[in-house]
Amino acid sequence: MPRRHRRSRDERPRPAVSGWARSESAEDGDWLVRTVPGAQATKMYRCPGCDHEIRPGVPHVVAWPADETGSVVDRRHWHNGCWQARGRRGPTRRR
């Protein structure tokens, strides 16, 4: 009986590693974006896209301008949908 083909360790898909930033380019500039899984979201943040809270346990993204990598001052936490729709609707102004 033939053996089943099994992928070697190098061929297996690797899970997304949180903590690594990917670069994205859009009309609003170049950004570094990091995905935060729900299990690692331990604080409450306010999304600049909708001005609603991102509660602990909710997966979201952290984005900051690519020209200022790692600047804590420029990092913003966004709901995934708000980040994807930012081209259609800009960030809200904080009241």
Image (cartoon, grey):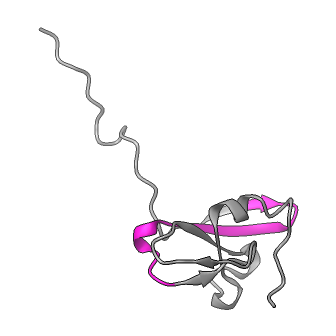
Q: Residue at x 49, y 84 (%)?
A: 43
Q: Is residue 54 above or below residue 6?
A: below
| Front residue of this view, candidates 6 and 63 | 63
Q: Going by the image, does 16 lie left or right of 69?
A: left
Within the magenta stretch, is there residue 38? yes
As drawn, the residue found furthest toward the left would be 1
Within the magenta stretch, is there residue 33? yes
Q: Residue at x 46, y 56 (%)?
A: 16
Q: Quadrant of residue 91?
A: bottom right
Please count the marks in the image: 0
Which segment did they paint magenta?
24-43
Residue 11, given in percent of the width and then of the height, sits at 37, 37
Residue 25, given in percent of the width and then of the height, sits at 78, 60
Q: Going by the image, does 2 lie left or right of 17?
A: left
Q: Residue at x 41, y 52 (%)?
A: 15
Residue 77, given in percent of the width and then of the height, sits at 63, 77
Q: Is residue 5 above or below residue 88?
A: above
Q: Residue at x 73, y 69 (%)?
A: 31
| Front residue of this view, candidates 71 and 41 | 41
As drawn, the residue found furthest toward the top would be 1
Q: Quadrant of residue 93?
A: bottom right
Q: Quadrant of residue 33?
A: bottom right
Q: Quadrant of the N terminus?
A: top left
Residue 52, given in percent of the width and then of the height, sits at 68, 77
| Front residue of this view, candidates 26 and 59 | 59
Q: Quadrant of the C terminus?
A: bottom right
